[in-house]
Amino acid sequence: LGFDDPAELLGENMHTTEHHTHADGTPYPLEECPIYLGFQKGIGVHRDDEIFWRRDGSSFPVEYWSHVMVQDGRALCVVAFMDITERRQGEKALRKSEERWRGVYDNSAIGVALTDVSGRFIAVNRAYEKMVGHTQDELRQLAFFDITHEDDAALNRELITDLMEGKRKQFQIEKQ
């Protein structure tokens, strides 16, 4: 939070100090604060979609847990939080990567099919649908071998067995 000494925070209102404003810059009224509402209701709160503010005016995303505790007959709110900036950056990078993959997958001229270990179709791209003459919904009702020509079945089984036994990491084939 940018304070040099924990004593600087003792006795201060937590909401006013670090939770006073939404990420978009609008004020965060105390009456809407989940920590305050949880305290009022005597329940714990967990959130990972808010920000806290530092002393210098900068903010950072947080995950927090608040719990009501009673000490010497007095209700206290204990809040544990952590800076999740790196997590958010990782999630953003993952979303970008997934978007790139989705673009390649959806727009590829090469047919791509994803199957489970039993050969049942999970997902296929448009090029694959065109190649085999079935929609993705139709293929989800089928297994890989349901659309494999009998002349190719033995080689396909051998390659899949090798893959499952760890004798190969992947395979690529052309077939009828």
Image (spheres, rainbow, N blue to C red):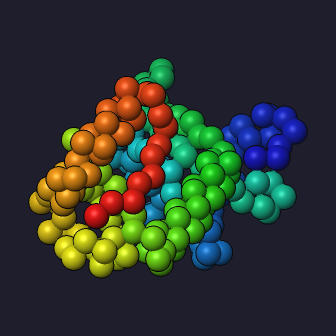
Q: Who is closer to the viewer here, 166 or 38?
A: 166
Would you identify the image quadrant in which residue 127 lies? bottom left
Q: Measuring from the top left, give residue 38's x and y in whole percent.
A: 39, 47
Vertical placement of 70 versus 52: above or below? above
Can residue 39 be seen here? The reply is no
Q: Measuring from the top left, give residue 18's x and y in whole percent.
A: 67, 54
Q: Residue farthest to the right? A: 4
Q: Residue farthest to the top? A: 72
Residue appearing at x 47%, y 34% in the figure: 168
Check the picture and name the quadrant holding the C terminus. bottom left
Q: Who is closer to the viewer here, 1 or 126?
A: 126
Position of 120 compared to 28: left or right?
left
Residue appearing at x 49%, y 37% in the figure: 169
Q: Who is closer to the viewer here, 75 or 163?
A: 163
Would you identify the image quadrant in which residue 93 lies? bottom right
Position of 154 compared to 51: left or right?
left
Can residue 81 be seen here? The reply is yes
Vertical placement of 72 versus 170: above or below? above
Q: Who is closer to the viewer here, 137 or 170?
A: 170
Q: Measuring from the top left, give residue 52's x and y in whole percent.
A: 65, 55
Residue appearing at x 78%, y 61% in the figure: 58
